[in-house]
Image (cartoon, rainbow, N blue to C red):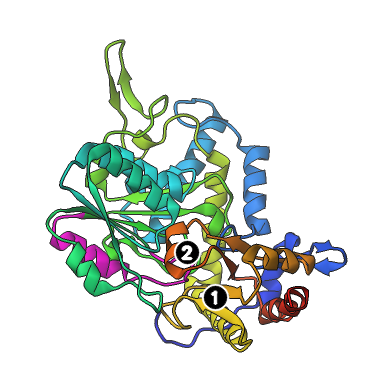
Amino acid sequence: MSQRNLEPLDVASIREEFPILQREFDGQQVVYLDNAATTQTPDPVVDAMSDYYRESNANIHRGIHHLSQEASRLYEEAHDRVAEFIGADGREEVIFTKNTTEGENLVAYAWGLNELGPGDRVVLTEMEHHASLVTWQQIAKQTGADIEYIRVDADGRLDMDHARDLIDDDTAIVSAVHVSNTLGTVNPVSELTDLAHEHDALSFIDGAQAVPNRPVDVAAIDADFYAFSGHKMAGPTGIGVLYGKQDLLEEMEPYLYGGGMIRKVTFEDSTWGDLPWKFEPGTPQIAEAVGLDAAIDWLEEIGMDRIESHEQELARYAYEQLAAEGDVEIYGPEPGPERGGLVSFNLEGVHAHDLTSILNDHTIAVRAGDHCTQPLHDKLGVAASTRASFYVYNTREEIDKLVAALDDARQLFA
């Protein structure tokens, strides 16, 4: 992010668009700090989806009637909107999936299963989400390819010297998380992509924790594939995006088959339709696409630079307040441009699940566990951690409530 002055967010006005943040349990207002799992959805997104169901609901493509034509237009315009948002060349490079995980699987099966073999190398990082790690692990077992992992150093950053050693002429693809959902680390994905391309390898970037809260330009990153989810960016659940360079997507065979993705079918064979429909069989997530389109409008009205600045400020404040407690261990880099808007930590003498339960008694929503990064937690030497993650509607006062509630856990486990 550029170091220019950005106008602070009017968080109070933003919060008014989220009725769920006004909910109370046992007389205590919700403090929602579980945004790395799922963000809340503002009224304009809910309204857009409701309007679709009330006024335009029909199945897309091939329908001659007005409603089908209108639904088709809305669905196709959503592809165009996403392409514009992430810097893709056009809708042909934007495939709607259920989530980031399905995007990982689509590439792994449609490309990896056909292209990988013994002697090929898949390079991941030690901070990969299971969506990447488990998927490529299974593909490697089926193809005989090898998997190597770029080390995470003591500060929670990638060891780029190790990356340069691992990524060689045997490497077929480098798959890396843009922002770690456990450490908060913002990885040098452009550098990783450059390393991959120097050795004629492809790159896959998991942007689930990046696209919601910072400007992302897939062309500038030069990623071959880039995936993210709607429900982490103020959009609906059930829809994600896989970006892929058009020439690669055209060469790949479909991952799923059925209606809507074909050009011609006979009793003997079938041929595939144009991009992106080739990878979107069956009735797709039409209402969810409308909601994602509305979420992008909502985010851009606020400004992605401002959202990034707000999250980094909250992460810095939370890091400093927790570090000052003395009995809290925090994981990942210190606050700054290399840390996103989350803080994972452990309170001495208290298991993460117990701490999360105590915080819930204060109506503070955080997440405990391994955050789908079990191997990373093994490396950190802990079974689980507590994660507080922030978004555009969170405040310093909510972080103060989190820190104050730690005293209850200390008293219970003293």
Determine whether the residue tagged by mark 1 lies in a helix, strand or loop: helix
Nearer to us of marks 1 and 2 is 2
Q: Is residue 411 above or below residue 57?
A: below
- Whichever of callouts 1 and 2 sits on the residue coming sooner in the sequence is 1
Residue 311: assigned label: 1
Asked if disc 1 and disc 2 are in contact, CB closer than 8 Å, the reply is: no
The magenta segment: 178-201
Residue 404 pos. (x, y %): 73, 81
Residue under the point 54% across and 75% down: 311
Figure quadrant of the N terminus:
bottom left
Residue 219: assigned label: none
| Badge 1: residue crowd in 10 Å (few <14, some 14–19, many ≥20) | many
Q: Residue furthest front?
A: 414
Residue 377: assigned label: 2
Q: Nearer the viewer, residue 138 or 327?
A: 327
- Locate residue 360 relative to residue 162 in the image: left or right: right
- Locate residue 191 relative to residue 3 in the image: left or right: left
* Count of labels in the image: 2
- Locate residue 108 relative to residue 199 in the image: left or right: right
Kind of residue sitting beneath label 2 = His
Residue under the point 70% across and 73% down: 13
Q: Nearer the viewer, residue 40 or 61?
A: 40
Residue 142 pos. (x, y %): 28, 37
Query: Can residue 406 be found in the magenta stretch?
Result: no
Q: Nearer the viewer, residue 397 or 282?
A: 397
Residue 230 pos. (x, y %): 52, 53
Residue under the point 41% across and 74% down: 156
Q: Is residue 124 above or below residue 103?
A: below
Residue 340 in sight: yes
